Amino acid sequence: NAGVMQNPRHLVRRRGQEARLRCSPMKGHSHVYWYRQLPEEGLKFMVYLQKENIIDESGMPKERFSAEFPKEGPSILRIQQVVRGDSAAYFCASSLQAGRGGADTQYFGPGTRLTVL
Amino acid sequence: EDQVTQSPEALRLQEGESSSLNCSYTVSGLRGLFWYRQDPGKGPEFLFTLYSAGEEKEKERLKATITKKESFLHITAPKPEDSATYLCAVSLYGSGNTGKLIFGQGTTLQVKP
């Protein structure tokens, strides 16, 4: 059973370009979370999605960032007009459900490391 | 404000020297507490979930325990391959808490042979 998949693993962008990060959840998982890990900082929640719905985007910067999880295909985290401060590792996690009792365990992908030049 | 604090920030042990990592939490309503292991350049790897005070989970040389205010990750007779950063995270009950995890800063463990 394949785990959470993310691509690309490494992404280099120049200031002002767009970055698109992809996440395929574990088989059978319909809940997707995105987290960001800035250098020397802990993991911070960004957004929580289910198929075709954004459930919680309280951790997402108000501008330039967007996320989607379409009916078909991977979840996408999109960063427009990247700046140097966006350089970080971006992790996707998926869970079977959001309730209690073990099914809410979030499994993480390997991450995408974004470098903005 | 909901907060998760891990200590120590870094820990060096000799192989076979047992120790414990601490995760203190100040939260409005704990739904679950999670321990992860993260190796350099990789994503967090799930270790344990704890839901209630008094609960214990065990896996190989690791044992996780929890009280109403903190959780411990006990490492018995560690080996060099246990070297990693150990992350503690909580999910909360209440409006606006949708299962997102709040992470501590992590404890970086180094086990020397």
Image (cartoon, grey):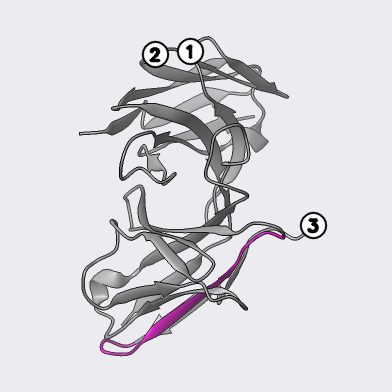
Q: Nearer the viewer, residue B65 or A41?
A: B65
Mark 1 surroundings within 10 Å by alpha-carbon count, few (fewer than 14), some (14 through 19), many (20 or more): few
Mark nearer the N terminus (1 vs 2): 1
Structural distance between the alpha carbons of marks 2 and 3: 36 Å
What type is the residue that disc 2 sits on? Answer: Lys
The residues colored magenta run: A14-27
Structural distance between the alpha carbons of marks 1 and 2: 5 Å
Residue B17 showing in the rendered view = no
Q: Are marks 1 and 3 on the same chain?
A: no
Where is mark 2, residue-wise? B68
Labels 1 and 2 touching (C-beta < 8 A): yes
What type is the residue that disc 1 sits on? Answer: Ala
Where is mark 1, residue-wise? B53
What type is the residue that disc 3 sits on? Answer: Asn
* Image side of residue A84 versus residue A2, left or right: left
Q: Nearer the viewer, residue B66 or A57?
A: A57
Q: Chain of mark 3?
A: A
* Residue name at image x 36 percent, y 37 percent: B104
Q: Which mark is residue A1?
A: 3
Q: Position of residue B77 (x, y in %)?
A: 66, 18
Picture quarter containing residue A23?
Answer: bottom right
Mark 3 surroundings within 10 Å by alpha-carbon count, few (fewer than 14), some (14 through 19), many (20 or more): few
Q: Circle 3 sits in a helix, a strand or a loop, which is it?
A: loop
Q: Circle 2 sits in a helix, a strand or a loop, which is it?
A: loop
Is A9 contained in the magenta span?
Answer: no
Q: Which mark is residue B5?
A: none
